[in-house]
Image (cartoon, rainbow, N blue to C red):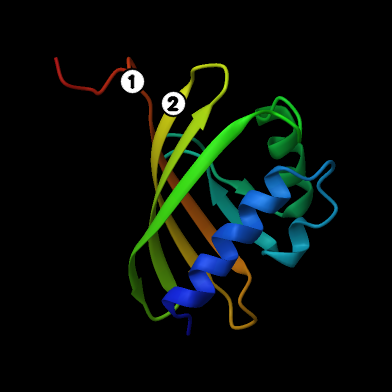
Amino acid sequence: MVDRKKVEQWVADYRRLWRTPGTGDLGKIFTDDVRYLPSPWRAPITGLDDLGGFWEAERAGADEGFTMASDVVAVEGPVAVVRVAVDYETGSRWRDLWAVEYADDGRCRRFEEWPFSPGQPDGHG
């Protein structure tokens, strides 16, 4: 089981690893067989190797400028919901909801992201 403090630490570790060159430390916060959904509409990424490739492709580099704020919305058993706001120096802005399921060792075994950005089609109309 996880609690709010453990979730906050995991999010801080996620942010730190996003800013760290390479992806060799992803196994510190994700299980080897992680199932990572970058959007509810995309196929899941499975396993650390594929997740590492995805991270490298998605970020401009470990030194890209951004600010990130997060708020743990709910924790129930091994699952947490986190609200995340990311503002990049390039002007890109994202508001996300993360559903994070933890393994017994505190690493994430399932991650689902619901990303939203201004101007993004919202499916209405």
Quarter of the picture containing the C terminus is top left
Q: Secondary structure at mark 2?
A: strand
Residues at marks 1 and 2 touching, judged by CB atoms closer than 8 Å: yes
Is 103 situated left or right of 27 in this image?
A: left
Up-down: is 40 above or below 34? above
- Residue placed under numbered mark 2 in the picture: 93
| Foreground pick, 2 / 66 | 66
| Foreground pick, 32 / 9 | 9
Q: State the residue at coordinates (55%, 59%).
A: 11
Up-down: is 89 above or below 18? above
Percent x, y of residue 37: 51, 45
Between the residue at mark 1 and the residue at mark 2, the CA separation in whole angstroms equals 7 Å
Image quadrant where residue 72 sits: bottom left
Amino acid type assigned to the residue bearing label 2 in the image = Arg
| Foreground pick, 78 / 89 | 89
Is 77 situated left or right of 38 in this image?
A: left
Q: Secondary structure at mark 1?
A: loop
Q: State the residue at coordinates (57%, 50%).
A: 36
Up-down: is 15 above or below 116? below
Q: Which circle marks residue 36 in the picture?
A: none
Is 14 situated left or right of 41 in this image?
A: right
- Residue placed under numbered mark 1 in the picture: 118
**Residue 40 shows up from this direction:** no
